[in-house]
Image: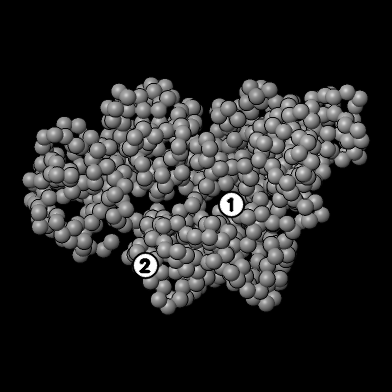
Amino acid sequence: MKTIPPKNPHFFKPIHEGFKNGVNIPTAFLAKYLKGQGPKFAILRRGDRSWRVKISGGRIIADGWEKFGAENGLNVGDFVVFRKEGDRVFDVSVFEPSLCERDWPLPHGGCPVTQPSNNFCSAARDTTSTSPADHPYFVSTIKSYCLKRQELYLPMEFAMSNGLVAEEKREMILRDDKERSWSVVMGRVGNNFSLRQGWQSFQMANDLKEGDAYKFELIKSGKTPIAKFHSLGTTSSSSAENPHFVATIKPYCLRKSHLNLPLEFARSNGLMAEGKREMILRDDKERSWPVVLGTMGKHVSLLRGWQAFRMAKGLKEGDAYKFELIKSGKKPIAKFHSGHFSGEEDSMKTIPPKNPHFIKPIHQAFKNGVDIPTAFLAKYLKGQGPKFAILRRGDRSWRVKIGGARILADGWEKFAAENGLNVGDVVVFRQERDTVFDVSVFEPSLCERDCPVPQPSKKFRSAGMVEPIARDTTSTPPADHPYFVSTIKSYCLRKSHLYLPLVFARSNGLVAKGKREMILIDDKERSWSVVLGREANHFSLQHGWESFQMANGLKEGDVYKFELIKSGEKPIAKFHSLGTTSSSSAENPHFVATIKPYCLRKSQLYLPLEFARSNGLMAEEKREMILRDDKERSWPVVLGTMGRHVSLLRGWQAFRMAKGLKEGDAYKFELIKSGKKPIAKFHCHSSGEED
């Protein structure tokens, strides 16, 4: 079976005695992915923190590594997995002897959103992001030069580690919090890397002033990177330097509906006054509440408005929080960080990973199934596994059954066979959603095994559309996005909505009880707000779709690719127009399957019902279709309905015999043109040919 290298290769290291002096990068990994020698340094990322380590002769040495080991609690018997994100950037997972991933260390200062003192985190993750794959970002403030010189400097380490530095200037798309987009030029001048032409227009449109705090988030890298600029309000100093205190919710906070501030904190920061006054209280999502600040006896307290804030946040007795004063004055502004704190002196506090992992060594009888670690079940699956799971690797996915705490042979055996599992291998499972796991397979060499080339499977037949949870092989971001490819049908224009394949919507967390908002972006980076909701057996884009469709001049038969950029409460998707019924093999609607015994016995070929329905192939009467092979030879075949099936009937036998098709042969059925006389292309490899 042919294989392809993984997009983000991993290597695996058991932790042995003497690990504090450094660890070796496996020779096979060095040879295959690092040209036989490692870089001079690397950035190791874990959770919301990063560590710079030195590399010498294919070995991560003590300088930097010792600190990483100490702050992540490494011990003999642990396992560490390194995932290559860039030339010098690795995402790291640490596993305990229980086979579960160890919790992450909190960022410096014990606050999940506080940045290091240099005011940026070049390889940190966005703690507020809902995307399955978080984005690199840094936090800073607007300096006087940003207004005077009309440019914005990016930290050089951030620019280099995220692939933004190039010899020539190039374009970047910069979005604001309202999803408006600007084209800006980025480039290097001397030792600085900055946004230039276009920055002034962005700065003026967003009314940025000296001292304004912002978060710069890189959404997509590649030839034309996309970044989001989050305005965080005006502050006289960085988040790490603002006055603050750390405490827990006491019973009186719930009973008396107010929150007392430490007297010394209030006095030293000018919060004591004779009368009551208003304060703005923000949460970690930058939502704001007006509260009354006043004196009660010997206390300075948050009074009216505190109860509404507390209830909205669902605060309970014992919850830890950090109260940070962003701005003082007549109308102070404070930020309330809720999380796991026990005072800033406690730098070894931990938080659960956003995408927890577990690890399984492969032993004898593994084909019968593998157990999910008890600790993982208890912590992340409420003590019991789901009934099924989707395992993803490379551009493929497998559905497996789960019984109790065990992945059963049904589905697992196929996964094991198609990924070449053997005794001595190690498998790492990364939880992306409740029932979706990204899987990495490691050989005894400690390097990740290459991924299997996409193959026909029943999964694709039942999905109907192009691999609904497959990865976008043309995508440039570090983490690829789920997508599907289809064509504009007449109902899209007549009913003013767009159906999404139900399996795509379910597997990517888009299905909810009520309607909700989605941001839809076109190829010009323009944004529309659309309503996402369910109608009977369909899940669709509704209100707002018509406006998008008209602005982009979409017509019946136009081919498009729908790419989910970000999931969560307010998903973001990109709509790529691919032209009208293009003959591009990569973009046309298609499905992949194998020749079944009935294809030979009954002399007909069934098309997946959802594929036929969504591409306009269902009709009351039989009609002609043109079927082409890879050599562009054509056969007329009859397309019609038989019972519950849409099938190729008369003419199929002649095509099959001419191609010498046999049971088990793989094929790809690609719809080139729909309409009264559809045209399809049949790509196949006979079972005698090399796959």
**In the drawing, does residue 371 fall left or right of residue 252?**
left
**In the drawing, does residue 218 fall left or right of residue 424?**
right
Question: In this orientation, which residue lies closer to the viewer: 514 or 210?
Answer: 514
Q: Are marks 2 and 1 in contact (CB under 8 Å)?
A: no
Q: Nearer the viewer, mark 2 or mark 1?
A: 2
Q: Which mark is residue 431?
A: none
* Res 609 seen here: yes
**In the drawing, does residue 571 fall left or right of residue 602?**
right
Labels 2 and 1: the sequence-earlier one: 1
* Res 164 seen here: no
Instruction: Give the alpha-carbon distance from disc 2 to disc 1, as whole Å.
Output: 28 Å
Question: In this orientation, which residue lies closer to the viewer: 190 or 503?
Answer: 503
* Residue 325 screen position, x and y as percent: 80, 36
The residue pinned by badge 1 equals 354
Residue type at the position of mark 1: Lys
Q: Which quadrant: the C terminus?
A: bottom left
Which residue is drawn at the image coordinates 72% and 33% (left, top)?
307
Which residue is drawn at the image coordinates 52% and 70% (left, top)?
446
Q: Quadrant of residue 227?
A: top right
Question: In this orientation, which residue lies closer to the viewer: 293 or 183?
Answer: 293
Q: Quadrant of residue 641?
A: top left
Which residue is drawn at the image coordinates 31% and 44% (left, top)?
465
* Residue 660 screen position, x and y as percent: 13, 58
Dot 1 surroundings within 10 Å: few (below 14), some, or many (20 or more)? some
Residue type at the position of mark 2: Ala
Judging from the image, what secondary structure is the residue with disc 2 in?
helix
Judging from the image, what secondary structure is the residue with disc 1 in?
loop
The residue pinned by badge 2 equals 409
Q: Which quadrant: the N terminus?
A: bottom left
**In the drawing, does residue 590 fall left or right of residue 293?**
left
